[in-house]
Amino acid sequence: MQTYLTALYAILAVGIVTWLFSIVKRDVSFVDSLWSLFFLLAAGVFALAAEPLGQRGMLVVVLVALWSLRLSVYITARNWGQHEDYRYQTIRKNNEPGFAFKSLYIVFGLQGLLAWLIALPLLPAITSTSNLGLLDGVAALLWIIGFVFEAGGDYQLARFKRNPENKGHVLDTGLWRYTRHPNYFGDFCIWWGFYLFAVAAGGWWSIASPLLMSILLLKVSGVAMLEKTISRRRPEYVDYIRRTNAFFPGPIKQDQSVGGEAKS
């Protein structure tokens, strides 16, 4: 438990430092780039506490690093040179006066706490010294599927957005042909994969983590938040909803006829 608390202290410390930077920049959007790095920080704390670091621990640390760094770099590149994200502009407007201070706990503190809670399966998975088994293979396969969907979906969306002719349209090819949110589905698979690593290490009790991540992706900051306004901004999205699964990949419901973009 002390190791787990140490990870929280480390996450909150980094959150405070970046919060101070956000005051100077008057922009809290870069907390999105920081989000995945919180997990890498927690994994590092757990790895340092492991004596010794076993095969499963080394594998999980590598997988966390690949997922974390890729996502952070992608979001940073996507947001570079942009104004504060509209979501945070709304939060800022609703919490004035005093948002500069309130953002410490509304934005940075909250996301740090959520990351710490979701990182729970990484503790048994990294600190366990038991040998790798069949369940670890299933966990690794699920993680790979998730990484392909998340990274692949992000790549396809970024490439689509670079073409000015696609402005205002809806991306419905590639992975986006089978699910409206391949990146969120990928994240879902990745964290259930980490949970299976934890189960293989005896950490079945950490199931609250993937459940919380699933709720966030489906009902809070993922699918629900994005689709709340996107139909008004992109009329084609109404038809896209009708013929494409929202989250879990599946066959299209009819032939597609248009291409375009849905920002995630």
Image: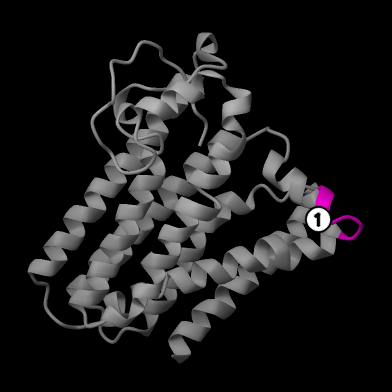
Q: In the visual, does 118 lie left or right of 106? A: left
- List the single residue furthest toward the left: 134
The quadrant where residue 110 appears: bottom right
Task: Check the image and name the residue furthest to the bottom.
Answer: 2
Place of residue 177 in the rendered image (x, y in percent of width and height, measured from the top left): 32, 26
Q: Quadrant of the N terminus?
A: bottom left
Vertical comparison of 49 with 102: above or below? below
Q: Residue at x 62, y 25 (%)?
A: 233
The answer, for residue 47, to whether it is visible in the render is no
Tell me the amino acid under the disc marked 1. Ile
Q: Give the image's coloring scheme.
A: one colour
In this rendering, the count of numbered labels is: 1
Q: Is residue 201 left or right of residue 9?
A: left
Residue bearing mark 1: 23
Q: Position of residue 230 (x, y in %)?
A: 58, 31
- Crowd tier of the residue under label 1, counting other residues whose Cα lies within 10 Å: few below 14, some 14–19, many 20 or above: some
Say if the magenta span includes residue 232.
Answer: no
Is 5 rendered above or below residue 120?
below
Q: Secondary structure at mark 1?
A: helix
Is residue 233 found left or right of 206 in the rendered image?
Answer: right
User: Is residue 212 shown above or below 233?
Assistant: below
Q: Is residue 126 visible?
A: yes
Query: Picture coordinates of residue 91 (x, y %)?
Result: 75, 51
Q: Give the magenta-colored segment's residue range.
A: 93-98
Residue at (57%, 28%) from the top-left corner?
Answer: 231
Residue 173 at x, y percent in the picture: 33, 21
The residue that appears at 56% across and 75% down in the rendered structure is 10
Position of 66 compared to 198: left or right?
right
- Residue sitting farthest toward the right: 97
User: As rendered, which of 106 and 239 lies closer to the eye?
Assistant: 239
Magenta stretch prevailing secondary structure: loop
The residue shown at (43%, 51%) is 69
